[in-house]
Image (tube, rainbow, N blue to C red):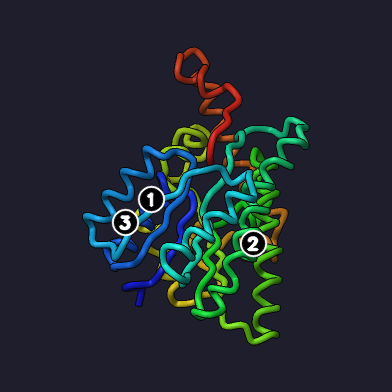
Amino acid sequence: MLKDKRVIITGASSGIGEQMAYHLARMGSHILITARTEEKLKKVVEKCTKLGSASAYYIHGSMDNMTFAKQVVHEAERLFGGLDMLILNHIGFTYFGFFDGDVDHIRKLLEINFLSYATMTVEALPMLKASGGNIVVVSSFAGKVGLPLTVPYSSTKFALDGFFSSLRMEFHHQKVNVSITLCVLSYIDTDSALNTVSHVIQQPAAPKEECAYEIIKGGALRQREVYYQYVATKIPMLLRDWAPEFLEYLVLKKLQRGCTQQEGMKNDESAKELKKTRYCKI
């Protein structure tokens, strides 16, 4: 289904985005990847070529610049002459900790995690309408349920749900043949996630390779939403609707257990590092 399809993948220098690039390369797709770090992108493109991609290119830059967000789409049009799938996966750097009152940080994060998604979608829409293509939005369980320690991040992910779920309904009403797949992800074993939250979240992290495959499959099959891992995301969603107080109790209990274990390590040098406020990509 994806052989010779023309695909943009954002946030593809590492983690889930990198793994999506490799899956699509094996499927014989034309790939344009983007992220901040050029050296990492070069290595991903080289591997995609070896894995059998129809073609593979990169463009580096930051998604806090809406001009760059548009440029990525224009580059795909120049290289491929059109577009079949837009995978929006990039995220900005933020902290994992109690909200520090910095509203300017939320504003900046909204530009990267939300406004650039909307900008790229609008710019790519003429090509996607022509191809009857797919928009794949990588979100999070934190974009469906408010979680502690993630106030700025969760805010931006909720915005994605509102924008793309509303847009999907408008497409249906207007008979626009472009699918929108929203991906609700649990705790994934990317390096950034493991380094950031492993000291608090006690559940095992799901494999990024399998996660990447499920995202691509959901987009290709034009699914409305993808939940990965299903039990860790879909079941709590039922509690959110039917027993929200109980869900909050479970979340806070897990948080307290993680913090208690961290406190028990307070004399250890590694624990001292973990207690510092972290800014990273989650």
Choose between 157 and 141: the one closer to the eye.
157
Q: CA distance from mark 1 to mark 2?
A: 33 Å
Provide the residue designation for mark 2.
239
Q: Position of residue 253 (x, y in %)?
A: 61, 41
Assign a secondary structure to mark 2: helix
Q: Position of residue 147 (x, y in %)?
A: 65, 46
Report whether 88 appears left or right of 156: left
Q: In the figure, 119 relative to 68: above or below?
A: below
Assign a secondary structure to mark 3: helix
Report whether 76 appears left or right of 165: left
Name the residue located 41 percent from the left edge and 67 percent from the top edge: 80
Instruction: Point out the tag, 1 or 2, that comes first from the N-terminus.
Output: 1
Q: In the figure, 38 relative to 129: above or below?
A: above
Q: Which mark is residue 22?
A: 3
Name the residue located 57 percent from the left edge and 72 percent from the top edge: 180
Q: Position of residue 210 (x, y in %)?
A: 36, 58
Q: In the figure, residue 218 lies in which quadrant?
A: bottom left
Q: CA distance from mark 3 to mark 1?
A: 7 Å
Q: Callout 1 environment at 10 Å: few (<14), some (14 to 19), or many (20+)?
A: many
